[in-house]
Image (cartoon, rainbow, N blue to C red):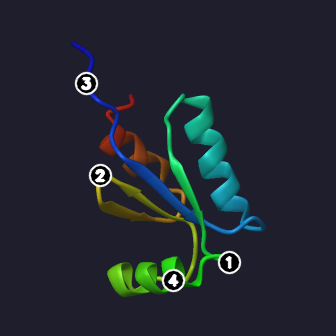
Amino acid sequence: METPQPKVIVFSTPTCRFCNLAKSYFREKKIKFTDVDVSRDERAARDLQRKTGQTGVPVIFINNRPIVGFDKPKINQLLGIK
């Protein structure tokens, strides 16, 4: 039986290079994710700051565990990718 894919949310902006790298990486690994553009969604930006203390992007949540920045080793660890 296949394990369900973790819930992945990427908080990003269109002009953020590391956000785009992270999203490309998820696409390459065929990981579904929800992209939240904090430059357009003010409430999401406030929520993100409240939850993590971060105002910068990307912040990636994998099963509600925040990763600040495009931290590939940590992403791989939480997704079980070798």
Cα distance in 3D space between marks 1 and 2: 23 Å
Tags 2 and 3 touching, CB below 8 Å: no
**What's under tag 1, amino acid-wise?**
Ser
Residue beneath label 1, please?
39
Nearest the eye: 18 or 48 = 48
Q: Return the disc, 1 or 2, that comes first in the chain's sequence.
A: 1
In the image, residue 41 lies at what x, y percent?
A: 60, 77
Cα distance in 3D space between marks 1 and 4: 10 Å
Q: Is residue 28 left or right of residue 66?
A: right
Q: Which mark is residue 29?
A: none
Cα distance in 3D space between marks 3 and 1: 34 Å
Indicate the secondary structure of the residue bearing disc 3.
loop
Indicate the secondary structure of the residue bearing disc 4.
helix
Q: Return the disc, 2 or 3, that comes first in the chain's sequence.
A: 3
Tags 3 and 1 touching, CB below 8 Å: no
Tags 1 and 4 touching, CB below 8 Å: no
- Crowding at dot 4, Cα within 10 Å, few <14 / some 14-19 / many 20+, comes out as few
Residue beneath label 3, please?
3
Residue beneath label 4, please?
43
Nearest the eye: 29 or 44 = 44
Name the residue at 32% across, 33% down: 80
Indicate the secondary structure of the residue bearing disc 1.
loop
Tags 3 and 4 touching, CB below 8 Å: no
Which of the two marks, 2 or 4, is nearer to us in this view? Answer: 4
Q: Which mark is residue 63?
A: 2
Cα distance in 3D space between marks 2 and 3: 13 Å
